[in-house]
Image: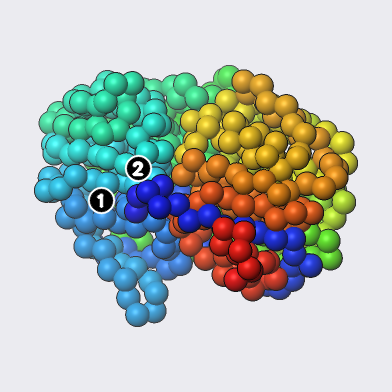
Amino acid sequence: MSHGASPSPLSAHSAKALTGTIRVPGDKSISHRSLMFGALAVGRTTVRDLLESEDVLATADAMRAVGAKIEKHADGSYTVDGVGLGSLLEPDRVIDFGNAGTGVRLTMGIFGTHDIAATFVGDASLSGRPMGRVLDPLRQMGTNVVARDGDRLPASVRGAKDPVPLTYRVPMPSAQVKSAVLLAGLNCPGETTVIEPIPTRDHTEKMLAGFGAEISVTLNEAGERVIKLQGQPELKPQNIDVPADPSSAAFPIVAALIVPGSDVTIENVMLNEHRTGLITTLIEMGGNIELMNKRSAGGEEVADIRVRASQLKGITVPAKRAPSMIDEYPVLAVAAAFAEGDTFMPGLDELRVKESDRLAAVARGLEANGIPCVETEDTLTVTGGANNIGGGTVITHLDHRIAMSFLVLGMAAHKPVTVDDGAVIATSFPTFKSLFSGLGADFSKNGSAAA
Ligand code: S3P
């Protein structure tokens, strides 16, 4: 699970046209939560189309370490036999979350109000990321924490024996922080309140309600979301069908727009309103994107998305849209490289604390491939339409989305684009290469002959 020791470079060459119909893997946010909430329920939860990526499998291991039984069946589904809220066992091993920020932060929330001790480690990327944003509210709920300087991993958590519920205003737009506090609130007596000034993905709220928790969401006078959770519910097992991940669909969507002659359909993609900022933006840029066969599946709206190659134009992306497309900026920057004029992306401060400093990683990757861009502390401007782009090697910094975004660039650039480590893609989208090869993409390892 730890990458970086022997990186595996991968190149993408310009493709003729991408055509076909594909299904990208299950949503990462919902997959993590299915395993966690299944572990906290009493009885058997069934999960179909779970994302089988390294991040999600790390969460499965963490839930096994506290007593949940998680099994894969012949039909590809998973079952989770929960231990029940309040009954988690103390892990007898260190919990290694690899690259998974969502996994570790939400699990810290769960463990933080259980009377158990646990030690968390991660890869070099995760060990550099700030954990104080979840550890601070947990400390207020009674959790004891010993962490490396700056609240980084490795960190040990001794959960509160008598946890106290909290009213917490989330200081940055982060679904992980909101979720960690709510999950800690599950095992507190009384009511936990989270105030969310800027709305973020709401999978935790929706799924906890589905598992039988008493949770309400209202707007206060200032228009902020106020989420109230009654502690110590009995969570009931669920049958979950995980819809396809819009953040993974983003790569074939952008690739189909920028590779001339392309026509690609991606099936069953989740359209949760907190996740569709990229689609809105690409349509504003002139992208030919059709949402077909809209329907409801597992409490979420889904659609088949047909994308045809389009001449894009540069726009200003509203800063307030950022939380609904926070993981999609790297691939949007690649789309912008093919648009007419400038694309201006403000409000990107949270990109600095993702799997890498994504703002810097994107800017360096664009520059390495001859694409003009300007990076400030929290904005990026990309100028589209440069000639003779590509030919560069992009440093991924253990960041799966940097790797995939720049491989998409290579599919439409004049010269091949190489990423220094293609193995990191397994974090979220292990079938990336095979699905894209099926559409007509041309990859090779280390710039050698196409595979
Ligand atoms: C996620 C929340 C987001 C997102 C991440 C998944 C989640 O992180 O970037 O990929 O499932 O809650 P932040 O909460 O840091 O914005």
Residues tagged 2 and 1 counted as in contact (Cβ below 8 A):
no
Label 2 is placed on what type of residue? Asp
Give the percent coordinates (x, y) of residue 88.
Answer: 16, 47
In the rendered image, the vertical position of residue 239 relative to residue 356, given as above or below: below
Compared to 373, does 391 lie above or below?
Answer: below
Q: Badge 1: few (under 14), some or many (20 or more) residues near its Cα, within 10 Å?
A: many
> In front here: 307 or 304?
307
Question: Where is residue 131, by image quadrant?
Answer: top left
Helix, strand, or loop for circle 2? Answer: loop
Q: Is residue 321 left or right of residue 168?
A: right
The scheme the figure's colours follow is: rainbow
What residue did someone put label 2 on?
123
Q: Which of 357 and 63 is in front in this view?
A: 357
Question: Are there few (<14), some (14-19), or many (20+) residues within 10 Å of tag 2?
Answer: some
Q: Nearer the viewer, residue 422 or 426?
A: 422
2 vs 1, front mark: 2
Can residue 387 be seen here?
A: yes
Taking depth in this image into account, of 19 and 14 the one nearest to the observer is 14
Q: In the image, residue 111 lies at what x, y percent? A: 23, 39
Q: Which quadrant of the structure image shows residue 130?
A: top left
Quadrant where the C terminus is found in the figure: bottom right
Q: Which residue is drawn at 32% across and 41% down?
A: 122
Residue 48 versus residue 75 in the image, above or below? above
Q: Which mark is residue 62?
A: 1
Which amino acid type is shown beneath numbered disc 1? Ala
Q: How far apart are marks 2 and 1 (CA)?
A: 15 Å
Q: Which residue is drawn at 76% across and 39% down?
A: 371
Regarding residue 272, the answer to whether it shows in the image is no
